[in-house]
Image (tube, rainbow, N blue to C red):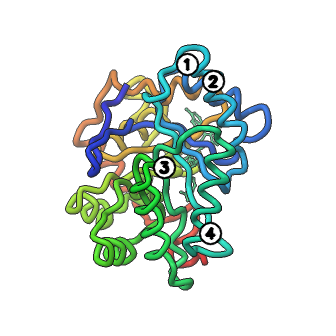
Amino acid sequence: MPADLHLLDGRTMPALGFGLYKVAGPDVGTVVDAAIAAGYRLADGAEFYGNEREVGDAVRRAVDAGLDRASLTLTSKFWGEESQSAEAVRTSFAASEAALGSPVDLYMIHWPRPERGEFVGAWRELIALQGEGRIRSIAVSNFTQEHLRRIIGETGVAPVVNQVELHPWLPQHALRAFHAEHGIVTQAWSPLGRGRLLGDPVVGRIAAARGVSPAQAIIRWHLQLGSALVPKSSNPHRLRENLDVDGFVLSDDDVAAIATLATDERTGTHPDDRQ
Ligand SMILES: NC(=O)c1ccc[n+]([C@@H]2O[C@H](COP(=O)([O-])OP(=O)(O)OC[C@H]3O[C@@H](n4cnc5c(N)ncnc54)[C@H](OP(=O)(O)O)[C@@H]3O)[C@@H](O)[C@H]2O)c1
């Protein structure tokens, strides 16, 4: 099990969690049950994923079966498509909290939506909710350096995590350096390039040489960068496989070969383009 990462607010968080986007219906319970049984202790959810009620049910089942709830980091994200006003933050947060039926450990602004011009105010509201003891740690997602500078400059509070698209095609060198300078943990979304990187021949060659799967090789690459990540799998076997990455190390040559894959290709939207 990869080691936990230290957060700016003095807490810790598992480096490797599991994603919940596009996990629906009965799959939600299967995935959460299998992930917790495998040893995952960070669930990456969001209001937008539309499955928080099912996630909450599965977490309650696990707690009833003996899971220490305090060991689990449950993430949710404020969607804010209609508005990022303080009131919208409060309403969304309360809806997520109610659906999960459980405290939110890590709460993020999902997208900065910069043209709206409201994300600094939304960030102030997350700070207020944390001050009221309703959120353990506050964070953002899809923030560029410019967005991060604004919220840090105007509130004096840095997010503990910025969750961004990051994988061998899009290694995010400059953003990761900025995070390191400010003590912000980088958390990779779509860390396997939505599964599309798994067929890459360079990744395949490295994985075969190490006797691991392509997914394990890429997950190891993220961990050796010092990033957190939230790969998604709806398959219990693959969930276990993705957590089993402590038994090998990528060499400098492996890392250099993976660096040749960087094209800055995104599988999702650029943060400045989603409003
Ligand atoms: N903050 C944001 O804006 C944002 C945006 C996108 C995603 N996310 C988060 O990031 C999480 C992961 O992103 P993602 O689902 O887009 O992409 P991903 O984790 O890069 O890739 C998921 C794909 O890889 C496959 N896969 C996973 N492990 C595998 C293995 N060991 N062998 C073979 N195939 C494997 C999965 O298939 P199976 O399910 O069939 O195994 C699925 O098709 C999401 O669930 C969500 O929590 C956040």
**What's the residue at 23%, 62% (across, down)?**
182
Q: Secondary structure at mark 4?
A: helix
Q: Earlier in the sequence, mark 4 or mark 2?
A: 2
Tally the marks: 4
**What's the residue at 65%, 71% (across, down)?**
81
**What's the residue at 48%, 48% (across, down)?**
191
Q: Secondary structure at mark 2?
A: helix
Q: Give the vertical position of 96 relative to 179 (above or below).
A: above
Say the numbered circle drawn on residue 134: 3
Q: What residue is disc 4 on?
A: 88
Could you tell me residue 235's position as x and y percent? 65, 28
Between circles 2 and 3, the one closer to the viewer is 3
**Could you tell me how far apart the alpha carbons at marks 3 and 4 are, in whole angstroms?**
16 Å
Q: Is mark 1 within 8 Å of ligand 1?
A: no
Say the numbered circle drawn on residue 37: 1
Q: Is residue 184 visible?
A: yes
* Residues at circles 4 and 2 in contact by the CB criterion of under 8 Å: no
